[in-house]
Amino acid sequence: MRLGSGAFATSCVAVEVLGVAIFLRGFFPTPVRSSSGKENRAEPPAPEPAAGDSSNWTTLPLPLFSRVVIVLIDALRDDFVFGSKGVKYMPYTTYLVEKGPSHSFVAEAKPPTVTMPRIKALMTGSLPGFVDVIRNLNSPVLLEDNVIRQAKAAGKRMIFYGDETWVKLFPKHFVEYDGTTSFFVSDYTEVNDNVTRHLDKVLKRGDWDMLILHYLGLDHIGHISGPNSPLIGHKLNEMDNILMKIHTSLLAKEREIHSPSLLVLCGDHGMSEMGSHGASSTEEVSTPLILISSAFERRPGDIRHPKHVQQTDLAVTLAIGLGLPIPKDSIGSLLLPVVEGKPVREQLRFLHLNTVQLSKLLQENVPSYEKDPGFEQFKMAERLHGNWVKLHLEENHSDVLFSLGTKVLRQYLGALKTLSLSLGTQVAQYDIYSMAVGTVLVLEVLTLLLLSTPQALCRRAELEVPLTSPVFSLLFYLVFLVLSAIHVIVCTSAESSCYLCSLPWLAAGGLMVLASALLCAIASALARMIINGALLRKNAAHSSSGWSEMDLLLLLGTAGHVLSLGASSFVEEEHQTWYFLVNTLCLALSQEIFRSYFLGDECKPQLHVHGSEGADYALQDSIGYDATQLHTRGEGPSPSEALGGRMRWTMLASPWLVMACCRLLRSLNQTGVQGAHRPDLSHWLTSSDHKVELSCLAALSLLVIFLLVQRGCSPVSKVALALGLLGVFCYRAAVGNVLFPWQPDNKGISKGIIEARFVYVFVLGILFTSTKDLLKSQIIAADSKVKTVGLWEMYSGLVLLAALLLRPHNLPVLAFSLLIQTVMTKFIWKPLRHDAAEITIMHYWFGQAFFYFQVGF
C-alpha cells in the first residue's frame, strides 16, 4: 500500500500513542479503594466484639487530645533530627526525643518521594502511585477519605499556613489559611517567614482544634546547595526554636483547659546526598516522626530508640487521637505507643476498629480475601477479644484476664501488620498483560519505522508500506489466531483482573488484528530488504549505498540501550551503559579516522550524494579543498593528501581527547545505586574548606564557556553574554556558593534575587535578538549569514540560562560539553562527512552521558 510520508508518520504516531497508553494503563496499578469511599454518609463504627452478651460499647472512643499541631518540615531527613546534626542544631528537639514526653519513629515514605503524594499518604493512609508525580505540578482536589475531611465533618476548626499544595488538596476545609508557592526554589527565607509570622497570634487564640504548618525552606536549601550546605544548620536551628515556641505555648494552654495536646513533627520525604528527592534511596524515604504530648509518660532513665514505621500509620493515629473515624482507604496501623497508657479495654477497642477497617478494605479489593493470613488472624483476634470482653463485663480481674488481654493485643498487632502488608502488596501489582501488549505494539511500530527509514528520507513524498498484501496472507490469520488464543487463556486463568480482559471482544479483537497486521508488514519489509540487498550486492554500482560500520554501531547501540531497560539492574545503573557507548563511539571514530587518513586512498570516507550545499561549503572550509567538485566529478586529492600532517594528527587525537574529558567528568559526580555513596570531586569542591578552589574552577569554567560560545554571535550579543556570565558568578557569590577575591568570608550572603534577575534580563535580550535575526532572514531577506548568527545567538542564550541553573561545581560539565561539541564538529563530523542522522544520534548519546555527568543538578 502506497502512503505519503506524512500519512505514514501520522499513522505510526497514532499507533505508538495507543501502545504507550495501554502500557501505562498496566504500569499504573489500580489503587486500593473502598467502595464507599466517595460517599459522604458516615458509617456507624463497628461494635465491640462480645461472646454471648451484647457489648455496651458501640460508639467511637473519646478523643485522646484536645488540640493537634502538625509541623511538617519539607525534606526533613531522619538523620537531621536523630543524627549529629540534630544534636548540634536542634538541642530542644533532641531533649524531647531523649528525655521528654515523646515517642520517636523513623517513618518510611514510599516512592515517589515528592510532596503531593506524601501529603496524601499522611492524611489518607493510602499509597499514592507514580501518576501522582504528574499531578504534583497542579494538585487536584483530594476526593479520597482523609483525616482533614473527617475533622471538618466533626466540626473541628482547622488552620493552615505553608505550602499551597494543602490548599489545593483541601479547599474550603480550613477556617484560616495562607499558602506559599513552592516553585521559587532560590527562596529559603520568605517561605518560612510567611508561615512563622502568623504563629504568635494563632498560639494565643483558643478558637482552633488543628494547626498545620508546612515549612519549605529546608527543601529549597537542599535543591540549591545539597544536604552538606552550611545553610542547613541555620535552618534546622530555626525549626528547633519554632518547635520550642509551639511546645511551650501548648503546655501553657493545657494548664488552662486541663486536657493534653499533641505536637507532631514530621517530614514529607527525605533528601538525597545531592539534595534532590523523588526516588527510593534510603536518604529520600527515611523521615522522622516525633509525637510529643504530656499524655505520654516518661520515666527517668527510660531510653527509647526510634522505631521504624510506615508513613501511612500517621493517618490512623491522628484519627484515633482526635476521636474520628479512620479513613476508609487507609492501609496504615495504629502506633501503639500513643495509646499504651490507656486501659487495656480502650487499647483493644482502638486496635479492633483499625483491623475492622483494614479487613473491609481487603474484602473489597481482594477476591480471595478469606484465605489471606491477615484476615484469618483478625477473625481469631476478634473471637479472643469477645471472650476477653465477656470476662471483663463479669468483673473478673484475675490473672487469666490479664494474660488473655495480652494475647489479644499481640494477635491484633500481628493481624494489623499482615493486613497492611497484603494491601500494600496489592497496590504494587502491575497488569503485566496490558504492559506486554502495549510494548509489542510500540516495538512493532518502531521496527516498521526503522525498516522504512531509507524510503522515508528520500526526496519522494511517497513510500511503499507492505500492509495490504500481508493482511490477506496465511501468516496474518495464523498470527491472529495465536494472539486470540493467548488472550482467551490469559483472561480465563488470571487471578487478578486485567484491563484488556475487561474490554469488549470487538475492541480486544481490533488490537489483535492491528498487532497481526503490523507483524506481517514487518515480515514483508524484511523479506523485501533481503531481496533488494541481494540484488545490490550483484550490482557493483550500488555497492557503496549500504549501511556503514558507524551506522550499524549507532543502530545497535541505541537498540541495545532500549532492550537494557527491561532489567531493573540496568535501569539503576543506566549511566554505565551510556559511558560504555560513548567510549565505544570514540574508539570507532578513532579507527575510522586512522583508516581514512593514514592508510591511503583505498579506505577513504564515503561521499554522500544527498549532502546540501551548506554542508559542502562547511566541508570545504574545514579540510581545505572543494568538496563540491568531488561530488560532481569524483576527482581530486585523497583525504590523506588533502590534509596536512598536523591536521591529520589533530584529528586522530580528537576522539582520545573526548574520551579523556569524559573520564574526568565521571569522577565529578558519583551516581547510581551502587556508587552514589562513594566520594567524588563534587563532595570535595562543595565542602566549606575548599570554597576558594570551587570559586576558581567556576570562574575558569565561565571563561571557557564564553570563549566557546561567543564566536558565532554578533558584537552586541557577545557583550550581553559576557555580562550575563559575570552575573552568574555574582549570583553564586551572593548565595554563598563561591567567593569574590575581595570577599574571603560569608558576610555578604543574600538570596541573590537581584543578581538572578540581572542574568535573566540578558538571557531574554539575547533570545529576543536571535528571534529578530531569524525572522529577518526568513521574511525580509533570505540571508543565510543572518540566519546563522540568529541560531548562534539563540544557542548562546540557552547556554547562559543553563549556566545560571547549574550548580557551581557542575559548571565544568557545561564547559566540557561545549568543548567536546566543538572538537567533534571541527575535527570529526565535517572531515569524515557524517550525515545529519548520524550526528543527531551522536548528540543524543553524548547528551545522555552528560546528564549523568552532572547528576543531581
Image (cartoon, rainbow, N blue to C red):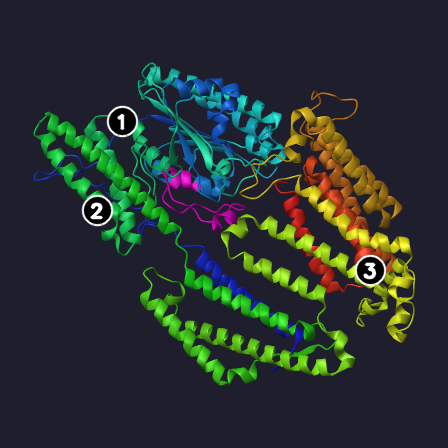
Magenta run includes residue 791:
no
Q: Which residues are magenta?
A: 120-148
**Left or right side of 848 for 598:** right
Between label 2 and label 1, give the one nearer the viewer: 2
Query: Depth check: 639 or 573 in front?
Result: 639
**Left or right side of 808 for 653:** right
Amino acid type at circle 2 is Glu
State the residue position of label 2.
Answer: 376
Between label 2 and label 3, give the one nearer the viewer: 3
**Left or right side of 311 for 798:** right
Residue 306 in view in this figure: yes
Could you say whether the residue bearing mark 1 is in a helix, strand or loop?
loop
Magenta run includes residue 139:
yes
Dot 3 alpha-carbon crowd within 10 angstroms: few under 14, some 14 to 19, many 20 or more: some
Residue under the point 79% across and 45% down: 765
Find residue 484 and report its horizontal and vertical position in percent: 40, 75
Could you say whether the residue bearing mark 2 is in a helix, strand or loop?
helix
State the residue position of label 1.
Answer: 340
**Identity of the residue furthest to the front in this view:** 599
Find residue 608 and report its horizontal and vertical position in percent: 80, 70
Residue 9 in view in this figure: no
The reply to whether discs 2 and 1 touch (Cβ–Cβ < 8 Å) is: no
Per the model, the C-alpha gap separating discs 2 and 1 is 25 Å
Residue under the point 39% across and 27% down: 306
Amino acid type at circle 3 is Lys
